[in-house]
Amino acid sequence: MNAFMPTSRIESSPLYNEDLAPATPERRTWGTYNFAALWVSMSVNILTYMLAASLIQGGMNWKQAVATVFLGNTIVLIPMLLNSHPGARYGIPFPVLARASFGVLGANFAAVLRALVACGWFGIQTWIGGEAINSLISTLAPSWRQVAHGPAICFMAFWLINLLVILKGIEYIRFLQGVSAPVLLAVGLLLLGWAYKSAGGFGPMLSAPSRFLTFSDFLKFLIPALNGTVGFWATVSLNIPDFTRFARSQRQQVIGQALALPTTMTLYSLIGILVTSATVVIYGRAIWDPVQLLSRFHSPTAVVISLLAILLATLNVNIGANVVSPANDFSNLWPRKINFRTGGIITCFMGIALMPWKLLSDYGTFIFGWLGGYAAFLGPVAGIMICDYFVIRRRVLLLDDLYLRGGIYEYSRGFNWLAILALGLGAGTALVGLVLSPLRVLYDYSWFVGFAVAFVAYAVLMGLLRKNVHPEHG
């Protein structure tokens, strides 16, 4: 681990603030358990359930859906661990790491892309929380169903709750950590128990067949579904240094993440898959939204308790997973003026602007539009950062220069236009599939295509301009 003590030269730089500074040795306290717990708390959430449930609604049987989730999360673990390394070694957050490849100012391209996606997820989680409030009020006061714009009112109410938590600051957020996983696990088990009883056991629950008549039809859905599953955590695979900067050692963060991410995602997804498969048997159609499913329960007490649990857990996951990163990313835009709290407030307003109700309108928009769309941009960013750190710089970074103008990461007035070009090539190649239907597979594999094209393009372009590499590398 590299110890870092900021000098007056660094502290006076416009690129420095306490939120972006490398973690000092006394802050490196996270061990294997902490990283495993992090992934348990982030994986056990409503959107994990909905991702898995959407695969059933899209036509998969339970075995196909489980295999897709496990494979996708095993794949995304690779870039996750690769980007974790510099965070653990140098104690730096994601937007600062991006300065090495994109330039001290150009890093804002990567940071803002990541932040906008997080804002979208923030809005989606907030909409789900609003749905839970709407269902809760409707259960307690049925006349609420007649109120015009009831869901929108509840959405804004939950949005205000999120904003208040952010204004309380990071310590209050930490206070909420740890409650989401057990609470949502309990809700999931409740739904599983209901599904088991209502469908007549696991036999009928697991009997819902695949709706794909041929292997070719199955592949047409599998490819974008797998891409969406990878894209689900493509966000955190970029900003994972925000967490690994606090690791005691590389070994502990690797083991913690490798043990917890694929297993927790698959196991909690299994609950969503089984319950949604049961809804096919019970209602004759797949219901992928657990809030809508809970609203069908006949016991008001069970509905109220479950929805309150979802509200608490959604608030915790939303703040932890969708505010911490964009708050740091927006802070990187103007370190002297935008701190964590201000960045969090920006995130809240952007979450509304991205209209989450449209992103959740149906499973197709969620998988093909939202997950596949942003994966086309985040895949290239991951490819560039991993190529820069492991291939170009061979895991050597000059910490001071990451916070200074005029250093090795200055490039051309703060921008590495080669990285930005590689980003454009990667994203453009993936998105061409939206325009040219014969090349649709490029968009269906948007994360993979964007990653590969940007990785290769960046390696070639930087290889032609070796002066941007440290002297140690020749």
Image (tube, rainbow, N blue to C red):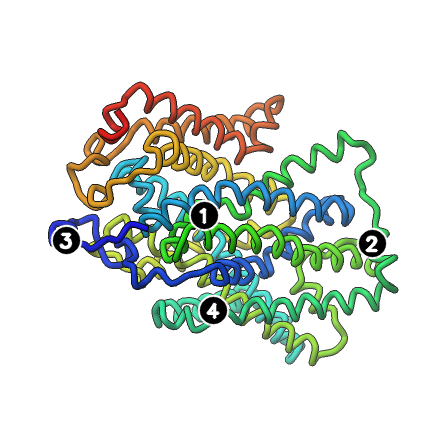
- 48 displayed left or right of 81: right
Quadrant of residue 284 within the rendered picture: bottom right
- 197 displayed left or right of 276: right
**Percent x, y of residue 408:** 21, 34
- The residue labelled by disc 1 is 117
Earlier in the chain: of badge 1 and badge 4, it is: 1
| Circle 3: residue type | Thr
- The residue labelled by disc 3 is 7
Q: Is residue 148 visible?
A: no
Q: Residues within 10 Å of mark 3 (few under 14, many from 20)?
A: few
| Circle 4: residue type | Gln
Earlier in the chain: of badge 2 and badge 4, it is: 4
Picture residue at 20% right of the left edge, 41% below the top? 401
- The residue labelled by disc 2 is 206
Q: Is disc 1 in contact with disc 4, using a CB cutoff of under 8 Å? A: no
3D distance between C-alphas at marks 1 and 4: 22 Å
